[in-house]
Amino acid sequence: MRLIDVILIVLPAFIIFAIGYIGQKKIGFDRKSISTSALYLMYPFLAFQTFYTNDITMDYAYILIFCLLLMILLIFIVTIVSKIKALKRTKSAAMILSSVFMNSGNYGVPIILFAYGEEGVHYAIIMMVIQSLLMNTVGLYYASKGSSTATHSLKDSLLKISRMPINHAVLLGIIVQITDFKVPEFVMLAVDLVADATIPTIMIVLGMQLASLTRGSVKWSDLSTIFSIRMVVSPIIALFLTIVLGLNPLLSSILVVLSSMPTAANTTMYSLEFNTEPQLVSYSTLLTTLASIITVPLVLWLVGAA
């Protein structure tokens, strides 16, 4: 894959970021309200669509094991780093959000399509679905745990997760798909319309958040730590896991590439909702996305895909 191909994939994302940035600078919006609307009203439709339209196969089991192990190891590394740096709870949770959860969906899937074709997209979609599930449970847990404006006991965090409509939509999507129930076409039309608008809305919110950042609000040492873990450590661990699990070469290379993706834009929405260091999370998303123009082609070349 040529560098220009990756740039063309990333460019639409930056255009949407710019729309949110300019809108916030010129007009000014209540970012929290828009973010909350996306999280509680729109994202459940995307979650339902994702789990309803993608067949659950045995490939899910292998990729699920991989994703769980990768997530656990990355959380462990961030936790150790946080203890060494004596970081407060909110910043430690924000670093987990930014370092552990990658943009394997609206960024990762097109990359895999370009590099591997339709055969590779099948695996990429499975990982996207699993990552969505992990982000909507474990990611929400850490966002809630790191909240600077609410209680943060394990019970409170789990209670908040159980009340999130996203997870209800995930469960409903899985049940409907397993039971082979056919959702009426007119219902799915409404679902698809809202679902398709969700990711752009989240990215616009990120652009708004970037417009509201203040100088000195984020330490470079924190950003560099997140960058190192997300863009360097994650694909290295992924390579190690694919060897240990004995996965086939195609699946192995795809999982390594997806593990090198930048921070998921959804993490900004979570950090805004729970006030979990939103500026750090937003900066991290922007930095890793910018850097991915260089790092992703490098990983593709290293795994022999480009």
Image (spheres, rainbow, N blue to C red):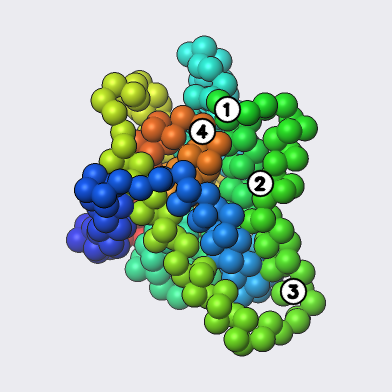
First-in-chain label (4 vs 3): 3
Query: Can you tell which of label 3 and label 1 is closer to the viewer?
Result: 1
**Between discs 1 and 4, the one toward the N terminus:** 1
Mark 3 residue crowding within 10 angstroms, few (<14) / some (14–19) / many (20+): some
Q: Quadrant of the N terminus?
A: bottom left
Q: Which amino acid, mark 1?
A: Thr
Disc sitting over residue 176 in the figure: 3
Residue positioned 67% across, 27% down in the render = 152
Residue depicted at 45% across the width and 52% down the height = 34
Farthest-out residue, bottom: 185
Determine whether the residue tagged by mark 3 lies in a helix, strand or loop: helix
Distance (Cα) linking label 1 and label 4: 7 Å
Instruction: Using the image as rendered, state which of residue 34 and residue 189 is in the foreground.
Output: 34
Identify the disc placed on residue 149: 1
Residue 209 appearing in the image: yes
- Of the numbered discs 2 and 4, the one sitting upstream in the chain is 2
